[in-house]
Amino acid sequence: MFRKVLIANRGEIALRIIRTLREMGIASVAVYSDADRAALHVRKADEAAHIGPAPSRESYLNIDRILEAAKKHGVDAIHPGYGFLSENARFAHACVDAGFTFIGPPASAIAAMGSKTEARRLAKSGGAPIAPGTEEGLESPGEALRFARDAGFPVMLKAVAGGGGKGMRRVDREADFVSSFESASSEALRAFGDGRVYVEKLIENAHHVEIQVFGDQHGNMIHLGERECSIQRRHQKVIEESPSPLVVKTPGMRERMGEAAIRAAREAGYFNAGTVEFLAENSGQFYFLEMNTRLQVEHPVTELVTGLDVVRLQMEIAAGTKLPFTQEEIALRGAAIECRIYAEDPGNNFFPSPGKITQLSEPAGPGVRVDSGIYAGWTVPLDYDPMLSKLIVWSDARDRAIDRMLRALGEYHVGGIRTNISLFEAVLNDAGFRAGEIHTNYLDEMLRRGISFEKPADEEVKRIAALVALRQQTETAATAGVASSNGSKWIAIGRDALLQ
Amino acid sequence: MRSVIRVDGEIVEPANADVVETEPGVYSVLLDGRSFEARVAGAEIAIGGHRFSFEIEDPRAWKRSVGAAGAHGRAVISAPMPGKVVRILVEADEQVEAGQGMVVVEAMKMQNEMKAPRAGRVASIAVHEGDSVVAGAVLASIE
């Protein structure tokens, strides 16, 4: 097993990986940019290396700087986390070339699945159903339009080198086709240096269901069941759960999807952890979407229903161990849900809300897990993704997991910045969500109908607020020796500390 | 004279309850045997999922403790992060209501409507449409 591992990432996922490393007795090396000197992952790692200025391109995406840090700290292996360089085949290759184990799939599999048309071809040859579409990426709209006419609108345009919703367009009418194609193509060219676009028949009101697969380097591959991630805002997942309510009520669906996912991964010569994403209709018919060749943000829901530590399994497989169990030995138990907590204001069009966290109270108690990268006093930087933490709960049934999540959200308090906690309260109380009748446009439709994020307060609660305001003012004044503004609480506390 | 407390802009008589500060900025309130937890962060109080702005007028000190939504004096509307002014929705001297949109700032590809923290008269507009602004830049003020 490895002695020391570098984590080429930041935030909650770096913390998540450090925790498993510590349990395994492996030393951890964090990396940080100028903006992250005081970040939690730097505080919690055994060692830390500075890798450059705040912009990702000059730090967390800088392969040379990360490899330099790995050499300097004498690590055996590198874990890329998710995002940043995790699906960069060149990085995986460079790690191996420099003598480090890359904790993830082989670079060749990352490259194969990174091309969305190649991924579709692999899935198809492995026997997985794919949504009807063009086989190849196209540079001009002519052939794509012929396909769209035959298949019928609406269609989706997607970038061959796609990811993160970039170069993606829904087209409802033929009149919009050419301009949509051109804007998708130029967006893809700017984002990925590859302007090729392919067209796919749009599967409407579909569930997003994905299969977690795991392969070792000895040819064994299994799956760890599914996750449903249909609650999305602008193509970004915000709530994930396992098992999927659709899969649970559709006989044989998990087995069929699991089989299709494993075959697609095998076609790419895959090993380690990966996720095969599908769109699924209410009938249970599903279509291959793409494969994510990394640890997913939402892996904790799989961990809670399987009882496994996915990151530990990644380490073992990267070190050459055989998968320690067979498909038959995997049992899913209960239901798990994850909410992605973001620094953004749902009451103000989800505008990002970076800034200093003045107070923090995290939920705890039965069945609750918080994977967090923040602390009270931390200033959320503007430079990176505004995800603060993930709140994950488990219970023996989906209903009770939803109730538990609502309870835990009520305990979660992040002071000084806005978070999207009130969004989750609205979704989890929604009758359609509770019934599991969800699809990838569900949340956007719900938001279009309008959700009130402000709960009406009765007079009594306002009177309590007035009482607390008065008390706070009195205490601040007493501590500071003058009647001062309510914003100076921290100054007052600081002064207190100095006088002691 | 007693202090006047405004919660979300309106004068509210404080509850007669048992209150203790349990950790910095966190208060436990017991009212008729029921338990509440209140958190003060800056100019806001959060109680059980509700958020309030508050302001205290202390007649002895002739000094006001004004939160983001002070009812008197000048309130400044500033940019929360670097961005570009895309629209100005009010004019100088105009009367505005609390919560009325004043300036639209675009940052990180999102349009953000900066709202009036309270009712009042627009005293100044410090930016023009198309201006780039830094975090904390003053956009407008209300009197």
Image: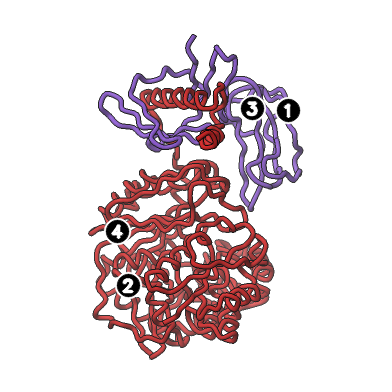
Which residue occupies the extreme front position in the image? Answer: A500
User: What residue does disc 1 label?
Assistant: B124
Image marks 2 and 4: residues in contact by CB distance under 8 Å: no
In the rendered structure, the answer to whether residue A427 lies left or right of residue A292 reads left
- Up-down relation of residue B51 to residue A45 (above or below): above
Task: Say what amino acid the circle numbered 4 marks.
Answer: Trp
Q: Which chain is red?
A: A
Numbered disc 4: what chain? A
Q: Provide residue A414's location: percent of width, then percent of height.
A: 46, 44
Task: Say what amino acid the circle numbered 2 marks.
Answer: Gly
The answer for how far apart the CA atoms under marks 3 and 1 are is: 10 Å
Numbered disc 1: what chain? B
Image marks 2 and 3: residues in contact by CB distance under 8 Å: no
In the image, are marks 4 and 3 on the same chain? no
In the image, are marks 2 and 3 on the same chain? no
The answer for how far apart the CA atoms under marks 1 and 4 are is: 53 Å
Image marks 1 and 4: residues in contact by CB distance under 8 Å: no
Q: Provide residue A407's location: percent of width, then percent of height.
A: 31, 46
Identify the mark at residue A225; answer none if there is no mark. 2
* Residue at x-position 69% and y-position 47%: B83
